[in-house]
Image (tube, rainbow, N blue to C red):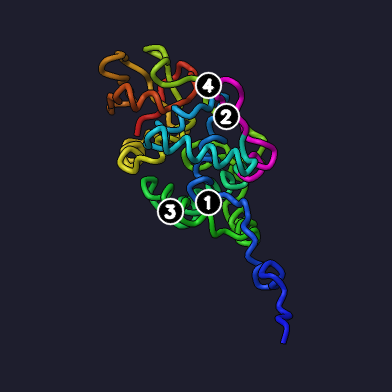
Amino acid sequence: MADTASPRATHPRRRRRVQTDSPTDKEREYLEVIYYLAARQEPVIAARLARWMAVQPPTVTHIVQQLEKKGYIVRDGRGEISLTGIGFTLAEAMVKRHRILERLLVDVMGMPWHIIHEEAVRLEHALSPTMEAHIEALVGKSLTCPHGNPIPGTGINYPGTTRLDSAPVGAFFTIKRIVEEAEEDSDLMRYFQSNDLVPDEQFQITDASPAYGVTLQRGNQGITVSPEIAAVIWGEITSASAPAQR
């Protein structure tokens, strides 16, 4: 009897196995970082991504090539990376999920700062639109994540226009946000929270040195933060009235 089976390509089971161009979990992480840098109007180049992700340049090159092949990013003649329309939509949705999850973990569940970033990373990829809507309802009208960075869709820009290491001695400084890179360091996040170096806390800058850092004073309490820590804290120069003692 003649073989009546059609070529393998016509098998209905094979038709459901068509490869998609969806990003991998690692590629999604890169899209988020590209979104962060672009939102802060910082140039997005491979070397910057390598520093953030703590990997070697060849690793970044491979993932960037994959993202470009899948249509999520484009590169110009200088090597600067931009999100395409579909890449931006996907990255913004991921960032929104991440930040509302962080709000849920802090505001509703009472988790400390130093563990919420990793927990949100684990949860965000599995979050359904229905669950996301319920979480949004739980966190209310929050405009930022607990670290002060804006939640997409709220209509606000990054708060804080002055970096702590550039604020003048004698000024009163209100912390507004901690940059996203710092969230990757759980020990650093524990340090911020345990020393009240969190959004909306106010200090007076009593000393500053490029070598030794910035000294902050509130009432009888003082703390000197290193230049590296001062570089990840952004805020506003506020009124000349002394912050309340605690």
Residue 144 percent location from the top left of the image: 55, 40
Look at label 1 and name its amino acid.
Thr
Q: Residues within 10 Å of mark 4 (few under 14, many from 20)?
A: few
Question: Which is more N-terminal, label 2 or label 4?
Answer: 2
Name the secondary structure under disc 1: loop
- Residue occupying image coordinates x 52% and y 25%: 160
Question: Which is more N-terminal, label 1 or label 3?
Answer: 1
The residue indicated by pointer 3 is 119
Residue at mark 2 to residue at mark 3: CA–CA distance: 28 Å
Question: Which is more N-terminal, label 4 or label 3?
Answer: 3
Residue at mark 3 to residue at mark 4: CA–CA distance: 29 Å
Q: Residues within 10 Å of mark 2 (few under 14, many from 20)?
A: some
| Circle 4/circle 1 CB separation < 8 Å | no
Name the secondary structure under disc 3: helix
Q: Quadrant of the C terminus?
A: top left
The residue indicated by pointer 1 is 24
The residue indicated by pointer 2 is 81
The residue indicated by pointer 4 is 161
Highlighted range, magenta: 74-90
Residue at mark 4 to residue at mark 1: CA–CA distance: 34 Å
| Circle 3/circle 1 CB separation < 8 Å | no
Name the secondary structure under disc 4: loop
Look at label 3 and name its amino acid.
Glu
Question: Which is more N-terminal, label 1 or label 2?
Answer: 1
Name the secondary structure under disc 2: strand
Indicate whether residue 81 is drawn in magenta. Answer: yes
Look at label 2 and name its amino acid.
Ile
* Side of 130 relative to 235 (left or right): right
